Amino acid sequence: MANADWLHVDVMDNHFVPNLTLGLPVVVSLGAATDLPLDCHLMIDDPDRWAPPYAEHGARNVTFHLEAAADPVRTARAIRSAGALAGIAIKPGTSLESCLDILPEFDTLLVMTVEPGFGGQSFITEALPKVTEARRRVRSGHLKLIIEVDGGVNAETIELAAAAGADMFVAGTAVYGADDPSKAVEALRELARSAMPADPAS
Ligand code: ZN
């Protein structure tokens, strides 16, 4: 997996989502074992309390869910002041409008393209208009954001996400289930690149 740009780590607490994965101690161990930047996606309750320590322990990007946060702006500022990028994630049923006001406080917008909780689900194309609208706002100079899609990303769906305006793609099953994971990363990257719309600003 050394040719991936970031290593995406799904942290689930069995409260915000009905699944339990891993937490900060394992993330710290992962960080010691890889040179890849860690992209921590916190599918947990009370991120206001639990997210900043991931930044303090060296994660490159710490994304938490809008639906779970009591004070997302304060949490984003705490993450950034600990030296990481701050990300906000929205579930398929959450509108982009519900986080537009606070997006300037963030570096990453993660649009979930499955319901968070489990790998191996099918890509929800209905989430893509949120990606398109976020990209339009970035293009018009109102926002500076990495737009990340997470859930059901594979060789069939990654071009849709790239064409909609995403520039970061989380692939789980499509990579870990492949005979040659690093080949799968490269193939997905090429598909995404070829489907990305040309940036009129560049
Ligand atoms: Zn994730």
Image: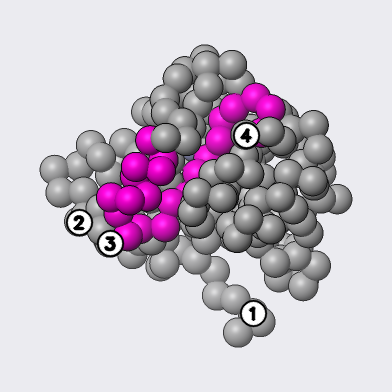
Q: Residue at x 34, y 44 (%)?
A: 30
Disc 1 target residue: 200
The span picked out in magenta is 26-47
Give the residue type that dot 2 points to.
Lys
What is the spatial separation of the Cα atoms under label 3 and label 1, in whole angstroms? 28 Å
Give the residue type that dot 1 points to.
Pro
What is the spatial separation of the Cα atoms under label 2 and label 1, in whole angstroms? 31 Å
Q: Position of residue 20 (x, y in %)?
A: 45, 20
Disc 4 target residue: 50
Q: Residue at x 41, y 43 (%)?
A: 28
Q: Say which label, 2 or 1, has the lower sequence index.
A: 2
Q: Say which label, 3 or 1, has the lower sequence index.
A: 3
Q: From the image, state whether disc 2 or disc 1 is nearer to you.
A: 2
Q: Residue at x 13, y 43 (%)?
A: 179
Disc 2 target residue: 183
Q: From the image, state whether disc 2 or disc 4 is nearer to you.
A: 4
Disc 3 target residue: 3
Q: Nearer the viewer, residue 55 or 174?
A: 55
**Disc 2, SS:** helix
Q: Mark 1 and mark 2 in contact (Cβ < 8 Å)? A: no
Q: Is residue 3 above or below residue 122?
A: below
Q: From the image, state whether disc 1 or disc 4 is nearer to you.
A: 4
Q: Say which label, 2 or 3, has the lower sequence index.
A: 3
Task: Judge the density around disc 3: few (<14), some (14-19), many (≥20) Cα neighbours within 10 Å.
Answer: few
